[in-house]
Amino acid sequence: MKTNRRNFLQVLGAGTAGFGVASAVWLPDWTSGKNNVDASASTMAGGIPVKRNNQMWPIKSELKSRRIKFDSPQNQISWAFMKELREHNKTRKIYDIDPYVEVYQFRDNLYGLFQENCDGAGDFWMYLTIGPEKAMLIDTGFGLGDTKALVDQLTGNMPLIVVNTHDHYDHAYGNCRFEKVYCHEYLVPYIENQHANMWDYLFDDYGNNIWLEFDRKDLPAFKKYEIVGVPDGYTFNLGGDYEVELVFTGGHAAGHAGYLDRKGRIFFSGDNICSDVSGCGSVNSTRPGPYAENTALKVYRDNVKRLVDRMDEYDYIFPMHFMNNIENNLMPNIIEACDAILANPEDYDYKVEKYGKDRSAGPSARYFKFIKGFSVIGYGYRKA
Ligand SMILES: [Zn+2]
């Protein structure tokens, strides 16, 4: 197959993790016989068979949810990892109490709760760490299915601390299944914005699911809950000397934080590190909202530096999308990529342009730089 390198990579790298990146919305032809995608598109990409239009084949699943469509294709590294895990991992289990979650056991005291994303972005992880006296749930997903009952079953009803890495739908809409949620203090005003209609966008005007087939009644009834904002470095005690520390990172969201399980020697990195696209903020245009200056790539870069300086405190990284259990030696490569972007934002590896609703405004671009041995950083950049 003859291919232009830049275009080819554009296709491979266009996946997302909780943020809308460009690429045409596609309709996979396994969902119904009438969806016609570009028949001229390739059926092989880098040796891996793909559906037409460069979409990967669906991964076998016994979940109650069923994928209708993604907004962008996943890259091959993410797809291959998830396929191997979901189809062959021996610890995978689906509990009757929550048929929307695949439960994986990664350590004696660490479970990964995998769920298909209710909107068109990448499927995601929640993590459950069990300490001597308390358990900690990191992120709550969309709230689809009875996450709380599942967690209680897994822990045997231990006291539970619930924390968020950031406010995006696929990480925090499940909060209202719980009484109290902790997060970085800059995230509080964002999470306070949650409301009873926040799930409406998952359905069209006729009430049909747009991206993922699931039963609407399996979403939680909205309720207000206690939100506790804590500063960088705040430590949660799970009993004895089992401590988990909130580490502020910024970048992907203004109040984005990771969680350092000092005892388990694991860093839960949220959405700043992702085997599809790591979305770590912008070079020179911050997003609207409180504490928006923390969505600058430079802020993220400086916080990664702090994590590189502490690499003797953790061995593995667990991101909230796709590939996990990644060795910590990835961290310096992330700094290297950030530094290269900051030194010359125009020296990107590829870019993706997309039109908004107003086509006359022209396309907006997102830029991508490779992280050595991993995936890419996607970044915003406004040319002078
Ligand atoms: Zn996110």
Image (spheres, rainbow, N blue to C red):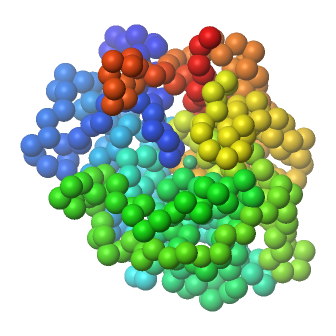
Query: In percent of the image, x 84 and y 80: which residue is there?
Result: 239
Q: Position of residue 60 (x, y in %)?
A: 34, 57
Q: Residue furthest left?
A: 34
User: Eyeballing the image, is 113 above or below 29?
Assistant: below
The image quarter in which residue 338 lies = top right
Please state, as top left, top right, bottom left or bottom right, where the N terminus lies in the image.
Answer: top left
Residue 343 visible (yes or no): yes
The image quarter in which residue 125 lies = bottom right
Q: Position of residue 57 (x, y in %)?
A: 31, 43
Residue 327 visible (yes or no): no
In the image: residue 156, left or right of residue 214: right
In the image: residue 97, left or right of residue 287: left
Please name whichever residue, 98 or 18, is drawn nearer the observer in this view of the structure.
18
Q: Position of residue 173 (x, y in %)?
A: 50, 64
Q: Position of residue 288 (x, y in %)?
A: 60, 39
In the image: residue 77, left or right of residue 336: left
Please name whichever residue, 62 or 147, is drawn nearer the observer in this view of the structure.
147
Query: In percent of the image, x 46 and y 53: which residue is there?
Result: 123
Q: How many marks?
A: 0
Query: In percent of the image, x 14 and y 35: which residue is there?
Result: 36
User: Eyeballing the image, is 201 above or below 105?
Assistant: above
Query: In percent of the image, x 42 and y 68: which residue is there?
Result: 196
Q: Residue furthest bottom?
A: 157
User: Eyeballing the image, is 74 above or below 30?
Assistant: above
